Amino acid sequence: MAILNRIPKPQSFENLGERGAFSRWMRGALILAAVVCGVGLAACALSDGCARRRAAAAQGPAKAEEGGPERPTLPPPDLHNPVRSAPKAFPPDSNLPRGKEIYASGPIDLATFSPERDLIRFEDPRVWFESDQDGPEDDEDDHLIHRALEVPLRRLVNLLAKRKGATLKVQEAFRAAEKNKIHLSSSLHCEGRAVDLTGEGIDLGELAKLAWQAGFDFVLYEKPKRSGLHLHCSVKRGPDAVLPPRPPSN
């Protein structure tokens, strides 16, 4: 403890007029001011950070990944009202938009398709599903659709419910490529992005109009040679899906 005795004791002054008293007082005042400013700045920074976090939580911006760009929060889709105007007519062997399905809904891409990630099970007691009528030996499931198909299909069900006595029938939905026996290998049914529909209590032309109003990217009033009249409706993989360029119109 001898070393502590060697430390000179701080000078004490009775008034500021004494030599060295004012300079020591100023140093103390500056140190105190610096401490107060530092505490104030830290409090402001903490308060601003909390405010930003509260604002971010209220707005709920979603990030695709850590450090990625912010994605705007979209309102829930309207499932009860048309998103397009109804065409004047929708006869057999016609489709909207005009042209091939690949230009409206895009090509199939089984290399990036994942049933576990992309397929969902669609349920609605107002809808008739063909697979529900099949026997146990048939393992097809017409409830399975691509998640991108859900919104227009639900909207179509709700639009059709406004017409008393009409029922939507799902004849074909997802068909696994390795078990596909009916559709082409390039069919969007193999990705769950296409559904074949008929109806009860409604003309197919009127149902085709509703399907177009419901927001499907492609609607075909199909008249095949080997099966009955039906609608073939499909969607893009997502809103940002890259579509093949359309050929120039003549």
Image (cartoon, rainbow, N blue to C red):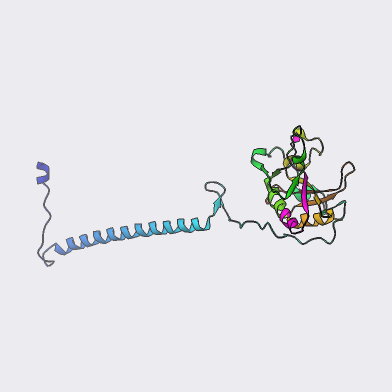
Please give the count of numbered marks on the rendered protein. Answer: 0
* Residue drawn 46% across the image and 55% down it: 53
The single residue placed furthest to the front in the displayed view is 165
Quarter of the image with the N terminus is top left
Q: Reply above or below: 78 against 63.
A: below
Give how far across and how far down residue 118 sits, in percent.
66, 42
Magenta stretch containing residue 193, yes or no?
no
Q: Nearer the viewer, residue 206 or 69?
A: 206
Q: Reply above or below: 18 against 156.
A: below
Image-quadrant location for residue 175: top right
Give how far across and how far down residue 99 sits, in percent.
83, 52
Q: Nearer the viewer, residue 199 or 193?
A: 199
Q: Which contiguous range is marked in magenta?
A: 156-177
Q: Nearer the viewer, residue 85 or 31?
A: 85
* Residue drawn 70% across the image and 60% down it: 81
* Residue drawn 21% across the image and 60% down it: 28
Q: Reply above or below: 175 against 105.
A: above
The single residue placed furthest to the right in the displayed view is 225
Image-quadrant location for residue 10: bottom left
Task: Please say whether residue 105 is visible from this viewpoint.
Answer: yes
Task: Please say whether residue 241 is visible from this viewpoint.
Answer: no
* Residue drawn 14% across the image and 63% down it: 21
Quarter of the image with the C terminus is bottom right
Give how far across and how far down residue 216 sits, in percent.
75, 52
Side of 95 relative to 147 (left or right)? right
Give how far across and how far down residue 221 sits, in percent.
84, 51
Q: Nearer the viewer, residue 135 or 199?
A: 135
Side of 142 relative to 19 (left or right)? right
